[in-house]
Amino acid sequence: MIGDLQTAALVGRDGSIDWLCLPHFDSGACFAALLHDESAGSWRLAPAGGGDRTEPERPSRRYLEDSLVLETTWRTEQGTVRVVDLMPPRGQAADIVRIAEGIEGRVTMESAMRLRFDYGSFRPWVRADGHDALAVAGPDSAWFHADVDVEADEDRLLARFALGAGDRVGFVLTHQASHLGRPDPVDPDRALARTKEFWREWIDRCQYDGRWAPAVRRALVTLKALTFAPTGGVLAAATTSLPEEIGGVRNWDYRFCWLRDATHTLQALLGTGYVEEATAWREWLVRAVAGDPAELQLMYGVDGRRRLPEMTLPWLDGFAGSQPVRIGNAAAEQLQLDVWGEVLDGLHLARQSGIEVSGPAWDIQRALLDWLEGNWQQPDHGLWEMRGGRRDFVHSKAMAWAGVDRAVRAVEAYPLDGPVDRWRELRERIHREVCERGYDAERGTFTQFYGSTGVDAALLLLPQAGFLPWSDPRVRGTVAAIERELSVDGLTRRYNPDADAGTDGLPGGEGVFVACSFWLADALAATGRAPEAEKLFARLLDLRNDVGLLSEEYDVASGHHLGNTPQAYSMVGLVNTARALEGRV
């Protein structure tokens, strides 16, 4: 992934950019080959004749230091070349910069770009003139400049050139609204220097210096890259519709901000010294949830908008033939009680960390408490956005408890007012019901929902939320049940869809959920099994791709990542587990 804190592009191992939405993360894609083929848009910059890109003892790709500048080294029979890809921090417009450099020998290179706006559905009008080209389609235009001649045919913009040792050829693609003129041109080398300096200054603020520092820094850079700079919102992932099962239908749009990620994201940012980003995320959160607490959603657009209508794009075949391809997310309309608790918990964490809370922020929290007090007993769709109807999910009820608990603690510790005696009684009532109805004494475990025969990896979050201590035998029994019933080769599924048929309302299955496996590592460490926790953590680090990224899920059988990528929840799990194993949480 490369990005400019407002959108991101995915670069394949073959040197092709196969995913890019412009001008923002959730805009239409102009390169969508990831979900179809090259005809949906792509930009490949690589040796014209292919060739072996790597020597056995060294990787072919890497990020330059702790940045989002990607370097790919190609080794061919003719020689060696290097391609550097980046998106400089946003200026007038979004820019993609690619620099090809000759290292040894003389290699023929090819740049082949197919621009297709609106997720591959529109072929733009294209005009090329020497080193420059312009593509226009409806509201979108793209300006292209190369240090070599560019030709346009019916299908693509093409440049072929040879690189000798020391030669450098730069390319810049700039997006602009079609009714505006061309933005100021970007110099590739200056953009590279500026981008490297931006990331160098940003990572220098990192306060984590523990055993897993390189992995944690890479995860933090990835989280920063998934931040929408104008508002402070943090995306779940940079992509849509990458399948949770190859050929299956569990393909969702994750280019939005999930409220439940707030506490974990805040914990990761605050725990590593990034107060500015945590403050921006808190302020985004307060703006997004302002209004009628009954209308609280589990997700919002990166700008805080509420309407995220879900639709399918039938002209795209999907990744590896996995249809449908969806944009928007109907889960935004679900009732998920845990969101109220997550929001209250996140705002409490910000308050504890010294981030000033304004009067209006507390007023919003009071309104959320009032709604939760009257509605916590409702069944809901649960953490995993079940589409099989509402249930009394145990995690949802426990997080409702957490929201009330944080309000009580806020009044006790800060000069804030509220009906604390009533809240204490409510807190006790919710706790008592969950322990009575959500715990299976015969099996010795909390269950996924009241009366369920299955368990849920989200139950690992109950002690993290303070619902019960890790030493409680009910917690230990739940950890054991999750290991026993949700383990796949030592990694963890979210739940077993076969345990209570029809719960999730979807056919097929999915891979193991990466974040849940990090939660299990946390649980193992907290219950006195540190060596097992570190072993699991090491294995999870090994799941990362060649440049340190994690997707949402993982297929143990094939060794492939599944789901949208890179996934913020997975990267947050890496940061928080590294800190937990060192006693920093």
Image (cartoon, rainbow, N blue to C red):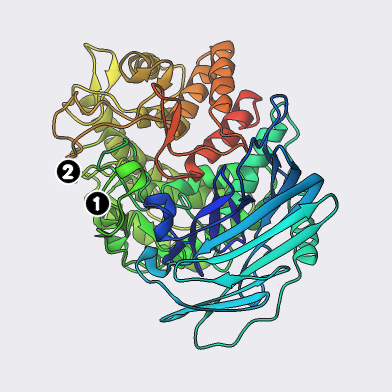
- Between 483 and 32, the one lying in front of the other is 32
Image point (40%, 63%), residue name: 289
Instruction: State yes or no: discs 1 and 2 in contact (Cβ < 8 Å).
Output: yes
> Which quadrant is home to the C terminus?
top right
Residue found at x 28% / y 48%: 336
Identify the element where label 2 is drawn. loop
Classify residue 487 by image quadrant. top left
Name the quadrant containing residue 548: top right
Residue 421 showing in the rendered view: no
What residue is disc 2 on? 390
- Is 565 on the left or on the right of 4, as rendered? left
Label 1 SS? loop
Residue 448 versus residue 161 in the image, above or below: above
Residue type highlighted by circle 2: Arg
Position in image of residue 152 (x %, y %)? 54, 72
Question: Where residue 452 sits in the image (x, y, percent)?
Answer: 18, 26
What residue is at 36 percent from the left and 40 percent from the top?
Answer: 399
Q: Nearer the viewer, residue 446 or 503?
A: 503
Residue 419 visible at all:
yes
Answer with mark 1 or mark 2, whichever residue precedes in sequence.
Answer: 1
Q: Residue furthest right?
A: 166
Pointer 1 residue: 335
Report, in whole angstroms, how far the alpha carbon at label 1 lies from the one at label 2. Answer: 8 Å
